[in-house]
Image: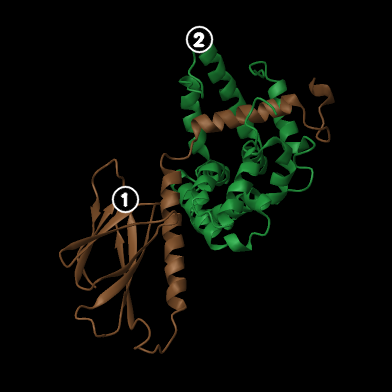
Amino acid sequence: MSAESAQCLADRAAVAFEDYRSGQASRMDDLVDLLTPLMWHVARACRLDPQASEDVVQTVWLKVVEKSESIKDPQAIVAWVMTATRREAWKVAKRADTTRPSELTTSMEVEAQNPIGIKPAQDPLEAAIRGDVAKVLWSHFSQLSPRCQELLRMVCFADRPHYDQVATALGMPVGSIGPTRGRCLTTLRAALSADPHWSLR
Amino acid sequence: MSDNLHEDQPLDDVDFGILAELNELLVAADPPPPGLAERVKFEVSWAALKAEVAQLQASEPVGVRAEQTYASTDTVTFSSSRVNLMIRVSREPASAQRQSMVRVDGWLTGRGRQVDLLVDGQTFTAQADSTGRIVWAKVPAGMAKFLIHVDPADGQPVITPVVQM
């Protein structure tokens, strides 16, 4: 038992979904809390704007309720939800031109100048360094192909042992990521390593 | 370090570190909108209720024998920003009783909420279960309204318009 939370997201979601299916209707609330952020980031990784992403998340949740009986394996709920979200996101993106690839870059530039981070910065120097690192990471990340950006943006929300399952759920070729590095992460890491302004904390 | 970097190598701590930083960056710079999960929960519980009522209505037998079963049903829905309530009123057929009585099945969003049914100058209080189902087995027919205690701490119930039961 490590110091981190005992169960990873996928396991907690599987338990909540199983409880819901065995009649504990209130566990759907827990499932929504667990998976909504992930689904949001999947939709955003498909380059949908915030309003469209929100609509996609709501639509997919209604599908989860509708199809809950037909999802055979509770362990598969995370993969199912990611696939459904991605499919719905691409359907929406095709239907209406709602992609705004530059939007996040703009907000990231603002963030880099006024870094917030998750922990409040005690040392202004540390905060400034964190901001620079994030800016460098984002600038190299943005140079990746859209496909690589999509993959890494979704994978970074997955639990460690499940990267390959995530890639499979997203319809990526075997070997895209997990258990090996794969092409996309290799490209990003090589670019970061070559940049004197970047270092891993 | 980058000389020996190859896509077929297993993921190492540096890779996990990069992905963790990417995660932190996105969590800080692009979080889900506040209240998204709450809006989803509301929509989901509402969809589940409607599905249950539809299922019940679909299973009503056609051509019932009036003297043995409830003769008619009505479904009314009340929607507000804080709670939704759906009621299904089943009238007993005309009987020897002077006053006709009805059965009210209800479904509301949220769990365990208390609802007062006001009819015929009386108040009938019932409590929803953890799935939002609520029942008044036998209440007088007539003009009725519901007081839904959405949040006991809040004190402000949601009051429905009057309906004819």
Q: Position of residue A4 (x, y in %)?
A: 64, 28
User: Is A157 left, or right, of A120 in this rendering?
Assistant: right
Residue under pointer 1 = B82
Q: Check the image and report above or below for A78 versus A141.
A: below
User: Is A67 left, or right, of B71 in this rendering?
Assistant: right
Q: Position of residue A151 (x, y in %)?
A: 66, 42
The structure residue drawn at horizontal position 61% and vertical position 52%, both measured from the top left corner, is A18
Q: Quadrant of residue B52?
A: bottom left
Q: Quadrant of residue B66?
A: bottom left
Residue under pointer 2 = A123
Q: Is residue A192 visible?
A: yes
Which chain appears green? A
Q: Quadrant of the N terminus of chain A?
A: top right
User: Is B66 left, or right, of A155 in this rendering?
Assistant: left
Q: Check the image and report above or below for B112 versus B142.
A: above
Depth check: B74 or A201 in front? B74
Amino acid under disc 1: Arg
Q: Residue furthest front?
A: B96
